[in-house]
Image (cartoon, helix red, strand yellow):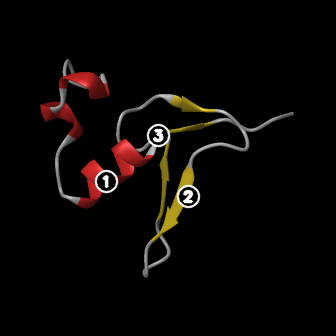
């Protein structure tokens, strides 16, 4: 069964074989659906402040 993940920034589903896995020095893992999400998370931006991220109502 293919395993699907959710983007840790915008919350969309990531299909198998796509996206980026980022592993921090302490062993925490983060999954990103696109470089746009990865770059915004790296800049310290909150996803709730971005209209396109889809988490504005949470």
Choose top left, top right, bottom left or bottom right for residue 43.
bottom left
Query: Sequence order check: which comes first, mark 1 or mark 3?
Result: 3
Across and down, in percent, residue 10 comes to: 36, 34
Q: Is residue 54 left or right of residue 57?
A: right
Tell how many labels. 3
Quadrant of the rendering where the N terminus is positioned: top right
Q: Is residue 19 above or below residue 44?
A: above
Regarding mark 1 in the picture, which secondary structure is present there? helix
Quote the CA–CA distance across marks 2 and 1. Answer: 13 Å
Of 30 and 34, the residue lying toward us: 34
**Which residue is label 3 attached to?**
7
- Badge 3: residue crowd in 10 Å (few <14, some 14–19, many ≥20): many
Circle 2 is placed at which residue position?
21
- How far apart in space, not on screen, are marks 3 and 2 (Cα)? 10 Å
| Residue indicated by mark 1 | 39
For label 2, the SS is strand
Q: Residue furthest front?
A: 35
């Amino acid at each position: 069964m293919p395993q699907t993940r959710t983007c840790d920034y915008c919350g969309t589903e990531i299909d198998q074989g796509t996206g980026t896995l980022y592993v921090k020095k302490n062993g925490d893992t983060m999954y990103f659906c696109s470089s746009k999400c990865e770059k915004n998370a790296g800049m310290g931006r909150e996803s709730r402040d971005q209209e396109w991220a889809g988490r504005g109502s949470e």
